[in-house]
Image: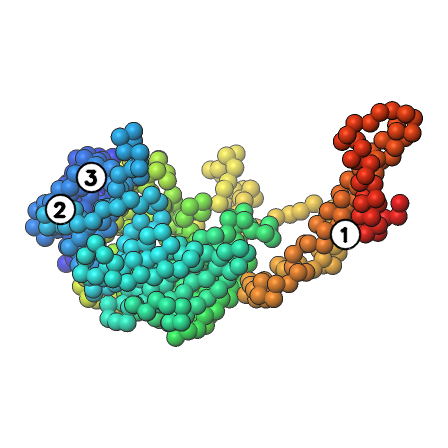
């Protein structure tokens, strides 16, 4: 018997549609907007749905299909529902005009029931625009300047509590429903000092009441990810430039923090970028994808101890299903679209598929199905989406003639679906899936259609070892020189990120002068000063000669003659004999 899946929202050039998919591959479409929409948003429980059709923002009740309110905000760029779904926050691009040189409020909070404005203000940057509520409460935190202001009972006139730290840039509220409620904030380093992430317990925001603190260098931007229990978090710190020159994409480091006060850097076994990290919905483990291609992936428990390491394959993203018993490792973007499905309990691979040109992937609320899509503007050709089952593979392919902008599942409350029972897969079936997901090897046109032996002769496979021509004597000599020089030159690349941070922190705390290149600068300044003094002395000698020849000197020239003794004395102090 076919089971109905949660509704799927499809947003494209032809408008906005809600689709009801069933497990047998049939669907029922309900078009709710014929115009192109800029953005959409579900409430956390999936009962409300909002969209902006570039004329108004509409809020619809999903059960009845009734429009609760329509708000005149045609330029809305992003939206967010409060946890209780009573308020809707909207943000649009900040703009100034001749009539309003100071700008108009571009951040608004609206009452869902009647569309009235509860609060508005100017929020110039899109980063940090979104307020954050403490789960299960009406306490809202909003980033204003270098402080987070907390409002209670949705009263945005006066802040009840304030978290103020110099250079504070990002804050994240823990998602746990029951108290204690915790807030993590990122503080950028100042004057060469380290950056830090601090955890506070609401409403204790003094420096003496920090729950946990982690300091680190090399942090232009950070991403903070809490687990669902609100007891541990991951911090991904990144800089745009890799000082070692090993990566074009900058340098990243991953840090682990616990509300018990424990902090550490996540030790990774391969150098290279950190592509993705994700907590399990069960909060008992997290996955990290890292390293130069082919990348590695590892599982760590909630004590930051490694429990399992996956093999090296082309991948750069990871996705847990809502029940936390299945994990997808995928290679999208400039990779071929490989999808590996793993059993998180047995640490065994369940299936493998290929979805080329995928730009987004999302698990369905039932934990068995997922959708992949090729969307615009990331890719403007071959737009469409595909419906998959983690065991059965591809179920449906829907291609779009025009642009497809977004595909997302309607959220479902926890406990709506039971966790899928993952079956054991034989090695033979798994190897057949892996071989079927690999693209066919290239065969030149003149060898196609011939016997298998003839085609095999010309087959080129990426797994075949490349044959290199022998180097000349001079090339071998230069290679040995480079290797010898590399081995002799001490570099920090052999040290781990944590060791480099410790060294840099020690130098910063001890104010180590050896860490700063002051000596060469001082020598250069002394040379410049000696050169300048010698020029002045030569000018004085020239004036003395002119005076002895009977030439009448000007007043300023006579004053220069009086500086001869002081110039000579300064040169002697610098160790120059005159």
The image position of residue 140, as x and y in percent, is 24, 59
Asked if residue 39 is positioned above or below residue 132 in the image, the reply reads above
Dots 1, 3 in contact, CB < 8 A: no
Q: Is residue 165 above or below residue 566?
A: below
Q: Which residue is mark 2?
A: 116
Determine if residue 320 is in view.
no
In percent of width and height, residue 158 lies at 23, 56
Image vertical order of residue 380 relative to residue 66, above or below: above
Q: Position of residue 531 (x, y in %)?
A: 79, 41
The Cα atoms of the two marked residues, 2 and 3, are separated by 12 Å
* Residue under the image location 25 percent in, 42 percent down: 105
Depth-wise, is mark 2 or mark 1 nearer the camera?
A: 2
Q: Which residue is mark 3?
A: 73
Front label number (1 vs 3): 3
Say which residue appears at 18% left-offset and 41% top-offset: 57
Q: Of 81 and 350, which appears nearest the observer?
A: 81
> Could you tell me which secondary element the residue under label 1 belongs to?
helix
Callouts 2 and 1 close, C-beta under 8 Å = no
């Amino acid at each position: 018997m076919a089971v109905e899946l949660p509704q799927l929202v499809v947003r494209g050039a032809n408008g906005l549609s809600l689709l009801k998919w069933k497990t047998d591959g049939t669907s029922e479409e309900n078009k709710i907007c014929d115009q192109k929409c800029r953005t959409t948003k579900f409430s956390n429980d999936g009962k409300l749905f909002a969209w902006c059709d570039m004329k108004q923002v509409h809020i619809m009740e999903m059960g009845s299909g009734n429009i609760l309110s329509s708000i005149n905000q045609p330029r809305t760029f992003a939206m967010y529902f409060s946890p209780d779904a009573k308020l809707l926050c909207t943000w649009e691009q900040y703009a100034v005009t001749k009539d309003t040189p100071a700008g108009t409020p571009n951040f608004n909070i609206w009452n869902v029931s009647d569309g009235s404005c509860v609060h508005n203000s100017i929020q110039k940057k899109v980063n940090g625009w979104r307020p954050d509520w403490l789960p299960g409460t009406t306490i809202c935190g909003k980033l204003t300047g270098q402080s987070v202001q907390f409002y209670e009972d949705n009263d945005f006139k006066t802040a009840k509590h304030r978290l103020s730290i110099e250079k504070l840039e990002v804050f994240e509220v823990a998602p746990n429903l029951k108290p204690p409620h915790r807030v993590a904030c990122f503080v950028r380093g100042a004057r060469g000092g380290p950056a830090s992430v601090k955890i506070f317990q609401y409403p204790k925001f003094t420096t003496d009441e920090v729950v946990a603190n982690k300091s680190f260098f090399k942090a232009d931007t950070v991403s903070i990810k809490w687990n669902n229990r609100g007891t541990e978090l991951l911090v991904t710190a990144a800089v745009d430039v890799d000082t070692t020159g090993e990566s074009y994409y900058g340098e990243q480091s991953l840090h682990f923090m616990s509300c018990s006060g424990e902090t550490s850097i996540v030790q990774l076994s391969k150098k290279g970028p950190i592509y993705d990290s994700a907590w399990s919905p069960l909060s008992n483990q997290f996955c990290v994808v890292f390293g130069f291609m082919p990348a590695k992936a590892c599982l760590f428990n909630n004590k930051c101890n490694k429990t399992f390491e996956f093999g090296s394959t082309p991948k750069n993203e990871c996705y847990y299903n809502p029940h936390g018993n299945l994990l997808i490792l995928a290679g999208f973007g400039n990779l071929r679209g490989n999808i590996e499905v793993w059993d998180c309990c047995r640490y065994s691979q369940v299936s493998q598929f290929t979805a080329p040109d995928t730009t987004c992937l999302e698990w369905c609320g039932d934990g068995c199905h997922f959708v992949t899509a090729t969307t615009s503007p990331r890719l403007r050709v071959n737009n469409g989406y595909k419906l998959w089952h983690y065991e059965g593979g591809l179920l449906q392919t829907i291609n779009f003639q025009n642009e497809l902008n977004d595909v997302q599942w309607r959220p479902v409350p926890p406990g709506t679906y039971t966790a899928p029972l993952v079956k054991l897969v034989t090695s033979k079936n798994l190897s057949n899936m892996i071989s079927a997901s690999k693209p066919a090897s290239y065969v030149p046109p003149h060898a196609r259609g011939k016997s298998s032996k003839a085609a095999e002769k010309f087959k080129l496979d990426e797994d075949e070892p490349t044959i290199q021509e022998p180097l000349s004597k001079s090339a071998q000599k230069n290679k040995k020189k480079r290797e010898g020089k590399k081995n002799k030159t001490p570099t920090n690349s052999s040290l781990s990120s944590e060791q480099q941070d410790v060294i840099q922190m020690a130098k910063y705390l001890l104010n180590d002068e050896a860490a700063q290149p002051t000596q060469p600068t001082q020598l250069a300044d002394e040379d410049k000063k000696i050169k300048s003094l010698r020029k002045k002395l030569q000018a004085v000698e020239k004036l003395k000669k002119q005076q002895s020849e009977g030439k009448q000197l000007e007043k300023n020239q006579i004053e220069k003659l009086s500086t001869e003794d002081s110039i000579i004395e300064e040169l002697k102090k610098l160790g120059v004999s005159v």
